[in-house]
Amino acid sequence: MKFYVSMAFMDTREAVEVARAADELGYDGMGIPDHVVNLETLSTPYPYTKDGKRRWEAFTDWPDPWVMIGALALVTTRCKFVTTVYLPAMRDPYSAAKAIGTAAYLADGRLELGIGVGWCEEEFELLGQQFARRGKRTDEMLELMKKLWEPGWTEFSGEFYSTPRLEMEPTPPPIPIYVGGLSDIALRRAARHDGWIGDLISTEAALQRVNRLRELRAEKGLTMDDFTIITPLTDAFTPEHYARAEAGGIHGIVTMPWMFYSGPDATLAEKIDGLKRFRKDLALD
């Protein structure tokens, strides 16, 4: 089982030291979330809580993921970086491809692109992007960005984007694409790419989706051998819990180890201590 340290809701000033400690302690990666702004009032309900309220308080840090990954890549040597999740359709594909490709280049192959289609209509509108058909635009953007990341000249003609002959440098290393979301539509999209990223769900709910992904991959004549599954789990705390998840096909857990010891108000020192204690308690070293 691989363990990714979530950087969600973290004080941006602590990120470098947490990443450096996680890298030195042997963690496998860092989970980097994405929002551009947090609007005070929304008519769109948050889809991942029962009451539709957001999980974070106002004025929580949401640093740009590509600036963050570029900085963290320079103080780490082994940790990978996965976005949890980035919303391509909220941007234009060329700026997104440039930022992602540059971060992947600086991370020297340690970048895993986790994407979603988005839920917040008001944030899309603020950034000048159409909320309707965002799923179809996401699919086309991923196809276009893959071409932009290839060496040499690129041309592209799609329903939403038409690209004249051009090149984009630097050419990044290969970037695996993992799709986030809990719906069947999200799972279908994930099955077409390199992996799936879950949300905060129980182990049983996650394993049900793993089985569904097996079905969807099999329909396309694909196996799960080269398919990655990463998710946070709400009910996994012990080696036995993680062993069950791994046996069911989950490859990576996104977690905040300090939450088990110091809670959400942990200081930087307590966060680093939590990283150490978590590995010791799970006998990971």
Image (spheres, rainbow, N blue to C red):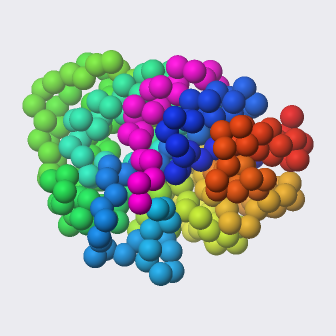
Residue at coordinates 24% horizontally, 35% vertically from top-left?
95
Image height of 97 relative to 136, above or below:
above
Measuring from the top left, give residue 259's x and y in whole percent: 71, 55
Task: Look at the picture and state if 276 lies above or below 114.
Answer: above
Decide if residue 247 is on the left or right side of residue 130: right
**Looking at the picture, does residue 173 appear above or below residue 226?**
above
The answer to whether residue 32 is visible is yes
**Residue 262 relative to residue 93: left or right:** right
Picture coordinates of residue 271 (x, y %)? 70, 42
x, y percent for residue 239: 86, 54
- In percent of the image, x 59 and y 64: which residue is there? 200
Q: Position of 62 compared to 130: left or right? A: right
Q: Nearer the viewer, residue 148 or 117?
A: 117
Side of 249 where 13 appears, left or right: left
Q: Is residue 115 something one can see in this rendering?
A: no
Question: Which residue corresponds to the image point at 45% horizontal and 53% vertical from the top-left?
Answer: 60
Q: Residue furthest bottom?
A: 51
State which quarter of the image contains the C terminus. top right
Q: Quadrant of residue 243?
A: bottom right
In percent of the image, x 45 and y 41: which residue is there?
113
Please state the total of marks drawn on the protein image. Answer: 0
Asked if the magenta segment contains residue 233, the reply would be: no
Residue 72 in magenta?
yes
Q: Which residues are magenta?
A: 58-78
In the foreground, 109 or 20: 20
Q: Position of residue 255 (x, y in %)?
A: 66, 51
